[in-house]
Image (cartoon, rainbow, N blue to C red):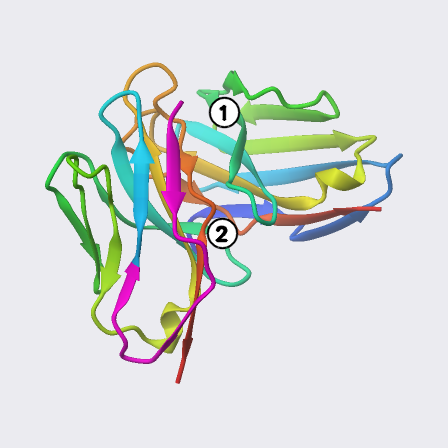
């Protein structure tokens, strides 16, 4: 248990559906992250929030829309996804945005797009 | 750009065998180096880290030494257990703008058999 929870753990959706992934951290951290983990590829950083402001958007398609209503919660809203978006989506948090700070990861949401 | 190269898996070892997972990096600045571990069905957890040359990170019997001259951060353990079966990721981050960005290797899957 790392102090970062994600729901749902598994999600199957069609290409026309709209769904949301939720992440919550109980560590009092100021920074939160969304990563995509695909088979045979390195983890890809998607979005970074610091103190509820987005500081990074790594050329992610607009069909992924993040939301950070407060420093403890992070959402990833999904709509009109493609089958190639099927992956494990990991949320992480850290105390601050520093290179030496450990990032704490949630267990991930396994997303399948049909 | 920054990158991490780690040995491709999978690696299969017998219990009590010696483990080495090689990791080399290229970085534009002076990076912090990390090893993360992902157990089945879970998110990533920090295993150990080192923030300057010749530092040795250690945890749970695992060790890695920051070698600036060879740009390496190889992971070692003297005697592996079945419970060490997981995927291991080498990662770096560089101080400065975007310093929160972790650049990951592709991961090395370790299976330890009794």
Label 1 chain ID? A
Name the residue beneath numbered marker 2: B43
Q: CA distance from mark 1 to mark 2?
A: 17 Å
Residue A29 magenta-drawn?
no
Chain ID at mark 2: B
Rendering coords of residue B109 (x, y %): 46, 61
Q: Which residue is mark 1?
A: A48
Please tell me how crowded label 2 is: few (under 14), some (14-19), or many (20+) other residues with Cα within 10 Å: many
Can you name the residue that lies furthest to the front here? B70
Left or right of A73? Residue B67 is left
Residue at image point 42% right, 39% down? B104
* Residue B112 position in % (x across, y down): 40, 75
Look at the numbered disc 1 and give the secondary structure of its residue.
strand
Give the image location of residue A20, x and y in percent.
72, 36
Callout 2 secondary element: loop
Q: Residue A37 — which label?
A: none
Q: Which residues make up the magenta segment?
A: B1-20
Q: What residue occupies the far left of the structure in this picture?
A: B54
Residue ranking furthest to the right: A16
Position of the C terminus of chain B by quadrant? bottom left
Whether residue B36 is visible, yes or no, is: yes
- Residue B16 on the magenta segment: yes
Q: Look at the image and tell me whether residue A27 can be seen.
A: no
Q: Is residue A22 left or right of residue B29?
A: right
């Amino acid at each position: 248990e790392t102090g970062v929870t994600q729901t749902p753990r598994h999600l199957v959706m069609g290409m026309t559906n709209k769904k949301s992934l939720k992440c919550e951290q109980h560590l009092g951290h100021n920074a939160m992250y969304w990563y995509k983990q695909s088979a045979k590829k390195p983890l890809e950083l998607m979005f970074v929030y610091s103190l509820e402001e987005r500081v990074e958007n790594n050329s992610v398609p607009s069909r992924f829309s993040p939301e950070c209503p407060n420093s403890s919660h992070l959402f990833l809203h999904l709509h009109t996804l493609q089958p190639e978006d099927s992956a494990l989506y990991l949320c992480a948090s850290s105390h601050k945005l520093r290179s030496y700070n450990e990032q704490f990861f949630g267990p991930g949401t396994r997303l399948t797009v049909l | 750009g920054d990158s991490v190269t780690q040995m491709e898996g999978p690696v299969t070892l017998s219990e009590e065998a010696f483990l080495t997972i090689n990791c080399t990096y290229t970085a534009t600045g002076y990076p912090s180096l990390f090893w993360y571990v992902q157990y089945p069905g879970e998110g990533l957890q920090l295993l150990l880290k080192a923030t300057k040359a010749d530092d040795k990170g250690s945890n749970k019997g695992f060790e890695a030494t920051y070698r600036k001259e060879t740009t390496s951060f190889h992971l070692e353990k003297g005697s592996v257990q079945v419970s060490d079966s997981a995927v291991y990721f080498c990662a770096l981050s560089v101080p400065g703008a975007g310093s929160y960005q972790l650049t990951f290797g592709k991961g090395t899957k370790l299976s330890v058999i009794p």
